[in-house]
Image (cartoon, rainbow, N blue to C red):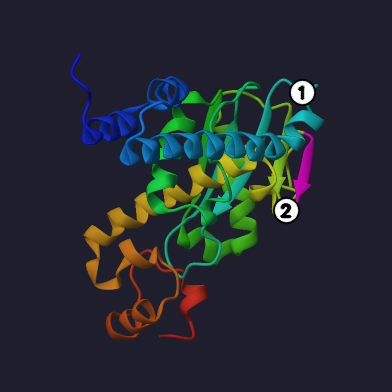
Amino acid sequence: MKQKTIGEIKAELKAAEESMLPVFIENYKEDTRNGVQAAVAQAKKRIEKLEAERARIEVLKKYEYEYAEYTYICGIDEAGRGPLAGPVAAGAVILPKDCDILYINDSKKLSAAKREALYDEIMEKAVAVGVGLVGPQRIDEINILQATYEAMREAIRNLGVVPDILLNDAVTIPEVSIPQVPIIKGDAKSISIGAASIIAKVTRDRLMAEYDELMPEYGFASNKGYGSAEHIAAIKKYGASPIHRMTFIKNFI
């Protein structure tokens, strides 16, 4: 049989799924060509990285294991408390007990592309996902903290499944009868809260991109409503838009 070229072997490695990496290594470990040995070494590094990521995820399940007697453990987090424009979003996620999703983390530590990919995987594999949105007028009316709580309660209602316990990023949500566990920096300590942070962040970012198409002068697609220098300059030039939080921009207009 004709020997595969190094280019063909590299392409095979690139296309190989995780389960095929040990087979790839076994098939080519005796091939003495430098390029092939480099590909074998790369396959071994991929396996090492995957094992390290699995170990990280196991640590991230600490609270889920601690409260394992509960059937439906729900992570809660928000996105958009600080921006000058747009809604505050909350995510509520119940993951399966045998959740195999890798790379979940505090959404701020992930690239936009990684968040998008994880959003789709979470939506596909979660037992239930709920989202809550509270708009700028309501934020101005009741303040951002109360609006955040309102968004979180809405996210819980939208789950479709009643959780047995809530793991929250830092806060205790008023007017909720379900047992709650507030965890400081929870989006980096609990896989459920991390998943909720991704759902909230991607939901809000997509919405801000839609607003950008309607009001491109504010640069919402890039600044997501946060107070960048360009965004503040646009507020001073064009005034407030319908999605600006008036209590947040009173110093700029």
Residue 227 vertical position relative to residue 141 in the rendered view, above or below? below
Residue 198 vertical position relative to residue 222 in the rendered view, above or below? above
Q: Residue 23, located in which quarter of the rendered image?
A: top left
Question: Which of the labelled discs sits on residue 170, or is there none?
Answer: 2
* Residue 174 among those drawn in magenta: no
Q: Which residue is mark 1?
A: 70
* Depth check, front residue: 46 or 26: 26
Callout 2: SS: loop
Q: Residue 242, located in which quarter of the rendered image?
A: bottom left
* Depth check, front residue: 196 or 160: 196
Task: Provide residue 52's location: percent of width, then percent of height.
Answer: 61, 39
Task: Provide residue 95's location: percent of width, then percent of height.
Answer: 60, 28
Residue, x 49% and y 35% (percent of image)?
44
Which residue reaches farthest front?
Answer: 32
**Quarter the N terminus occupies:** top left
| Residue type of the residue flagged with mark 1 | Tyr
Residue 28 vertical position relative to residue 237 in the rendered view, above or below? above
Q: Which residues are magenta?
A: 179-184
| Residue type of the residue flagged with mark 2 | Ala
Task: Provide residue 169's location: percent of width, then percent of height.
Answer: 68, 49
